[in-house]
Image (spheres, rainbow, N blue to C red):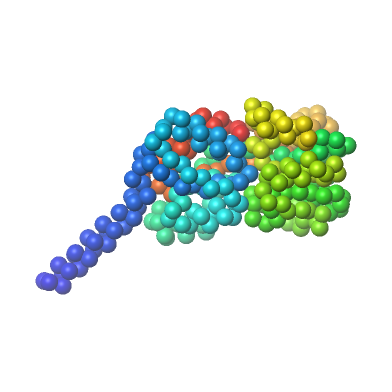
Amino acid sequence: MQKLLALIFISITVLSACNQSKQKANTDTLQSGTIYISVDESFKPVIEQQIKVFNSSYPDAHIIASYKSEADCFRDLQKDSTRMIIVARGLKEDEADAYKKKLDYIPRENVVAFDAVAVIVNINAKDSLYTIQQLKDILTGKNNIPAIMDGNNATSTVRFLQDSILKGESFGKNVVAVEGSKAVIEAIEKNINAIGFVGLSWVGNSDESAQLEQLKKIKLAMLECKNCEEKDVYAKPSQATIMYGQYSLARPLFYILKEYIEGLGTGFKILCQVKGATYI
């Protein structure tokens, strides 16, 4: 009888600990509390803006964001301290299975907006119209002009270009990795012959004075239109060309959220979906 009571006590203790671990990170509400999130660095300008909007409405909410490479964001998601990441892809099947085993549930995920990889060139560059084949020739080194991007293997921009343009081929020796999106912009400002790749939110906000100043030194290249009936039509990255599927390098922006019970992470992702607009 004592052994039976002991087993029952152990079972209750284990179940209680499991329930506490599921709810431990969710002691906040939709509008209050503290949450640590990791964000793909290429989305930093737009997410910073959304955090300011959220904080102005809910001063008791504290969203502490770290901006880093896509690979580092996914590594952070494995930590108990990071409850939410914002990246350019969803969970792979094996990743979802691993979280199911570890947490007893799969983190919620969905597309929160659509973004684009903007192609930028110096304001005095001769060429600012490109086909996808021309970009591929540059990225593989067939056309040996400097191609500058935010890292060489762990960022969403690099992965997206590999998947959407290279399709299995390798980058050429002319591809240059720098530290972050700001460094890409600065490099293009100084090099009339180079081409750069950054998230659109770094260069596409006409309401941001710093970005307007940048556009005195760089310009957005136009790419062959993806869904245009006419031939030889080129599209610049914008909300409209992303929405209508005309810009060739558009990409989804995902949130991935570890919340067993709806908390501050849920509140923030709702705002991003509603107030942040469908297209960045």
Q: Can you say whether 229 is above or below 189 in the image?
A: above
Residue 57 location, quadrant:
top left
In this rendering, position of residue 7 left or right of residue 22: left
User: Where in the figure is residue 146, as x and y percent of width and height?
Assistant: 82, 50
Task: Looking at the picture, tell me which residue is in the foreground, 23 or 6.
Answer: 23
Q: Residue at x 68, y 45 (%)?
A: 181
Residue 52 visible? The answer is yes
Q: Residue at x 86, y 38 (%)?
A: 125
Outermost residue, left side: 1
In this rendering, position of residue 6 left or right of residue 180: left
Task: Looking at the picture, tell me which residue is in the foreground, 105 or 263.
Answer: 263
Q: Residue at x 88, y 37 (%)?
A: 126
User: Where in the figure is residue 65, as x and y percent of width and height?
Assistant: 51, 45
Locate the N terminus by quadrant. bottom left
Locate the C terminus by quadrant. top right
Q: Can you say whether 20 is above or below 47 in the image?
A: below
